[in-house]
Amino acid sequence: MSERSTRLLLIYSRLKSGPVTIELLQQWAHKYDIKVSGRTLYRDLLTLETSLTLPDEKLVVSIGEKNRKIWKLEYENDEQKLTSFDVNSYMLFRNFLPLPIIDSRKSSLHKIVRLFYRQFSSSDFEKYTSVSQDQIRCTHFGEARSFGDYHKMLDDCIWSIQNRREIELREIKSHYTSATSGVQLPLRFLPVQLLYHRGTVQLSGFLKQDDSVFIIAMDQIRTYKLTNEQFDTANLLLRLEKELDCRFGIMRNLNDEIYDIVLEFAEFTGNYIESQRWHSNQKFERLENGNHLMRFRCGINRELIGWIFSWSVHVKIHEPAILRELVREKYKEADALYDSEETMAYSEYSF
């Protein structure tokens, strides 16, 4: 097959994913290292426009903003039109997925894109071609990166949850949720829910040995084994949700106590804090000095301590006293670190 014929097939393949302009096609060619000029691409599109005749589809050309030509495939099996709201929803879904999902499931996502476009090709996609990867972008800041078997592990976890099958966790990495370094492996685990939290997909459920809540990040699981041992899911999801309501985030609590947390935030920081969801029972009050009082009820864990630290001098703890003293002690330790020659050491129980 000639170079031109190969290029025409590639362009046709790109058209199956949505409308294109010359500018979009040039970006696509550059991304996939296709050496071709804009003039040549224009001629290729004209060739497809005049010679592409396939059953149930046609190449439609329209004029968009600034007299730019837009080429798109339309299929004859469309049932309804999409609105601009629908198209924008699709673009947001396509670009705001977590990084490990995007990395590990590229072929599936590409298939969905093609099916979506084929079903709704006669909608006014050409009006929204500017809403592309460059205009709707996710930084993926702080998100976990995928690894070689991530897609398989994700599918295995979904299968285990759907079929109520135990998982044997044989080897796990360092702790940062519930997986402490002192646990005895292997662990028999009852998976209940996949949970996306702070850029990481977590597997949550219960340990069979002591019926305790156990949450572990997907990237912390090194080796595991699927089993055919079924478990009863009655009330497990409800119990998990109740336990998470008692935590700040997902990390295990320091103890079994539940506290009334009262924090005061400086005015401008408080404006932001009040606009976000941090806990299921959070409540806010505006003080006479302009600051914000935040109240919620949960246990104390390392995630709460770290979150308070992130607001530096713009937050003050009113209640409980134990939380205030823990934070003050940590500030002292952080300050002493700069006057010490000792090597830093991680402690999973360090609050």
Image (cartoon, grey):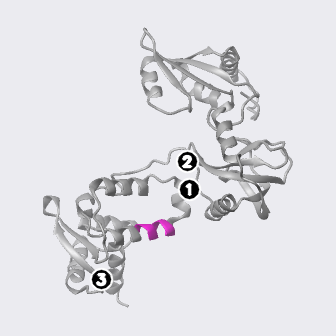
Amino acid type at image mark 1: Pro
Quarter of the image holding residue 331?
A: top right
- CA separation, marks 3 and 2? 42 Å
Quarter of the image holding residue 146?
A: bottom right
Q: Secondary structure at mark 3?
A: loop
Q: Where is residue 281? Give x, y as percent.
A: 56, 29
Between 282 and 265, the residue placed more toward the observer is 282
- Which span is picked out in magenta? 107-113
Q: Secondary structure at mark 1?
A: helix
Amino acid type at image mark 2: Glu
First reached walking from the N terminus: tag 3 or tag 2: 3
**Would you call the spot at circle 3 few (<14 residues within 10 Å), some (14-19), or many (20 or more)?**
few
Judged from this view, the residue extending furthest toward the bottom is: 1
- Whether pointer 1 and pointer 2 mark residues with C-beta atoms closer than 8 Å, the reply is yes
The numbered mark at residue 143 is 2
Q: Where is residue 188? Give x, y as percent.
A: 81, 54
The numbered mark at residue 100 is 1
Q: Is residue 223 above or below residue 247?
A: below
Residue 295 visible in rendering: yes
Classify the position of the N terminus by image quarter.
Answer: bottom left
Q: Secondary structure at mark 2?
A: loop
Residue located at (55% from left, 22% from top): 312
- Whether pointer 1 and pointer 3 mark residues with C-beta atoms closer than 8 Å, the reply is no
Q: Where is residue 322? Give x, y as percent.
A: 71, 17
First reached walking from the N terminus: tag 1 or tag 3: 3
Is residue 343 highlighted in magenta? no
Q: Where is residue 53? Give x, y as percent.
A: 26, 87
Classify the position of the C terminus by image quarter.
Answer: top right
Q: Which residue is mark 3?
A: 56
**Would you call the spot at circle 2 few (<14 residues within 10 Å), some (14-19), or many (20 or more)?**
some
